[in-house]
Image: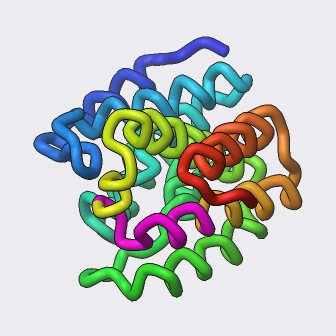
């Protein structure tokens, strides 16, 4: 796969719309997460549309809602917009209750396209790797960053492994399972 100027444009767009955002509980610029997800997608053999979807997967949810999704559609096309829409758990402000939102997303992702599944799995893998690394640095206080706290966060990642595996699995999902299993182990909660 060759990355065209569309990818560069998407990276600039993502950097602009997520400017000033940081990873939860850290000083890490949010664009680092977007680049990490795109890297996983590219390494897995994803298309340019999937790589662009990875860069923009949180844009509607965290940076503009339905209007942002419409802008993505006009700039990057229907395929990218459909990936972003499928990776969005809500565009509502304020966001609905956490557990219900996550349950709805799990049900929704089970029916997503292969492209959206790849991006969603890459997103969860990058997040889980970050959570595991941060847990090793700060321990139990890590869970205060998350609305779902420890039990809810671990439930969500384990549920995502199950739904992604059922929907088709693949190398990213298997790696996600390994990371979540290690996170459960070090956090003292066996699956």
Quarter of the image where one finds residue 49: top right
Quarter of the image where one finds residue 28: top left
| Residue at 88% from the left image edge and 60% from the top image edge | 166
| Residue at 33% from the left image edge and 81% from the top image edge | 95
Q: Is residue 153 above or below residue 59?
A: below
Residue 127 placement (x, y as % from top left): 48, 44
Residue 115 shown left or right of residue 14 in the figure: right
Q: Is residue 149 on the magenta stretch? A: yes
Residue 82 shows in this picture: yes
Q: Quadrant of the C terminus?
A: bottom right
The magenta span reads 145-155
Name the one closer to the observer, 23 or 82: 23
| Residue at 51% from the left image edge and 47% from the top image edge | 77
Q: Quadrant of the N terminus?
A: top right
Q: Is residue 84 on the magenta stretch? A: no
Per the picture, the main secondary structure of the magenta-coloured stretch is helix
Q: Is residue 93 above or below residue 66?
A: below
Q: Is residue 17 above or below residue 103?
A: above
Name the one closer to the observer, 148 or 166: 148
């Amino acid at each position: 796969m060759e990355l065209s100027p569309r990818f560069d444009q998407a990276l600039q767009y993502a950097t602009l719309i997520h400017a000033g955002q940081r990873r939860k509980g850290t000083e890490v610029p949010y664009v680092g997460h977007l680049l990490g997800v795109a890297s996983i997608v590219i390494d897995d053999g994803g298309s340019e549309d999937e790589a662009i979807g990875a860069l923009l997967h949180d844009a509607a949810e965290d940076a503009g809602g339905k209007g942002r999704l419409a802008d993505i559609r006009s700039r990057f096309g229907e395929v990218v917009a459909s990936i972003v829409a499928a990776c969005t758990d809500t565009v509502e402000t304020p966001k609905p209750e956490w557990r219900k939102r996550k349950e709805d997303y799990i049900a929704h992702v089970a029916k997503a396209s292969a492209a959206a599944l790849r991006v969603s799995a890459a997103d969860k893998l990058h997040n889980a790797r970050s959570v595991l690394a941060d847990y090793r640095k700060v321990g139990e206080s890590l869970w205060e960053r998350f609305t779902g706290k420890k039990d809810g966060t671990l439930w969500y990642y384990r549920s995502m492994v199950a739904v992604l595996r059922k929907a088709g699995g693949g190398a990213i999902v298997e790696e996600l399972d390994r990371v979540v299993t290690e996170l459960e182990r070090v956090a003292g909660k066996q699956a």
